[in-house]
Every structure is written in C-alpha cells, then in structure tokens.
Amino acid sequence: MFDFAMQTATELDLSYAANGTVKGPLRGLPISLKDQFHVKGYDTTMGYVGWIGTYEGSQDPAKLHKVNSQVVEELLSLGAVLFCKLEETVNNIIGTTLNPVNQFLSCGGSSGGEGALQALRGSSVGLGTDIG
C-alpha cells in the first residue's frame, strides 16, 4: 500500500505545482487504516484467512479490489494520503501484534495494530472502528 501512498502524494504535489491550490483540508496528511475498510486494489481480510484474495469471502470479480469504503472515498477527496492497513491484534494471517512499549502487555483489542502503530508514533492519524 506504500506505493499507493507515494502515488497519491505525487499526484497531490503535481496538482499543487500546476494549479497553485491544495486539494482539501487534509492535503498530504498520512493516515493509517484498520483492515476493515476497503481500498481499491488491496485485500480487506479483517484477519480472516478465507477473505484473502476475495471480497468479503466472495469471488465476485465485479467487487474484488474494485471498491472503496465510503470513508476511504471521503478521506481521499479531502486530500489524505492512505499509507497502510493494519490487522487485528491476534489473527491467523499475521499472528499476534505485540505492544511496542511493553511486550508483556497487549497492544489493545481488535484495533491493536493501529494502537501499536500509534504508540510507535508511526502515523499522525489512524482510523478504525469496532463495527465491521
């Protein structure tokens, strides 16, 4: 997803150079997402092995990697740069996300990947929800 972020940032810079105006109030702000938001071109697994390479478990080619979640559309329209998607704290795809400050403690519940990234100051803004 880093390539997508670099492409978005480059497009924002080129647009600014050509027009002299910024695109939206979030222009260039790097934002991380919990892996429950669909981003065109990328899997959304929510930690389910059966969702790898599918659209929520469906093989429907009309939807696979072709849908953005509404919040993704809104963030992009406001000029945000989406640079990564983070998994649940414990899942069967990446294993367990550890607390970067104290590995004897959990890094959180279902948004633990986002919590760990925030603890490391790896993202200025992170978006997640417990309603999937």
Image (cartoon, rainbow, N blue to C red):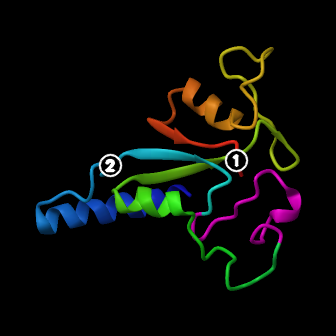
Q: Identify the main secondary structure in magenta.
A: loop
Q: What amino acid type should be assigned to the residue bearing mark 1?
A: Ile
Q: Position of residue 96 (x, y in %)?
A: 82, 35
- Which residue in the rendered view is the most extreme toward the left? 20
- The span shown in magenta is 39-57
Residue 44 is a magenta residue: yes
Rounded to the nearest angstrom, the CA distance separating label 2 from label 1 is 24 Å
| Viewer-nearest of discs 2 and 1 | 1
Q: Position of residue 43 (x, y in %)?
A: 69, 64
Of residue 58 and residue 104, the one placed in the foreground of this image is 58
Along the horizontal axis of the image, is 127 left or right of 16? right
Q: Quadrant of residue 90?
A: top right
Q: What amino acid type should be assigned to the residue bearing mark 2?
A: Leu
Residue at 74 percent of width and 71 percent of height: 55
Q: Secondary structure at mark 2?
A: loop
Q: Quadrant of residue 54?
A: bottom right
In the figure, 127 relative to 79: above or below? Answer: above
Along the horizontal axis of the image, is 92 left or right of 101? right
Residue at 51 percent of width and 33 percent of height: 122
- Badge 1: how crowded within 10 Å, few (<14), some, or many (20+)? few
> Image quadrant for the N terminus?
bottom right
Which residue bears the numbered disc 2? Answer: 26
Q: Position of residue 48 (x, y in %)?
A: 84, 55
Which residue bears the numbered disc 1? Answer: 131
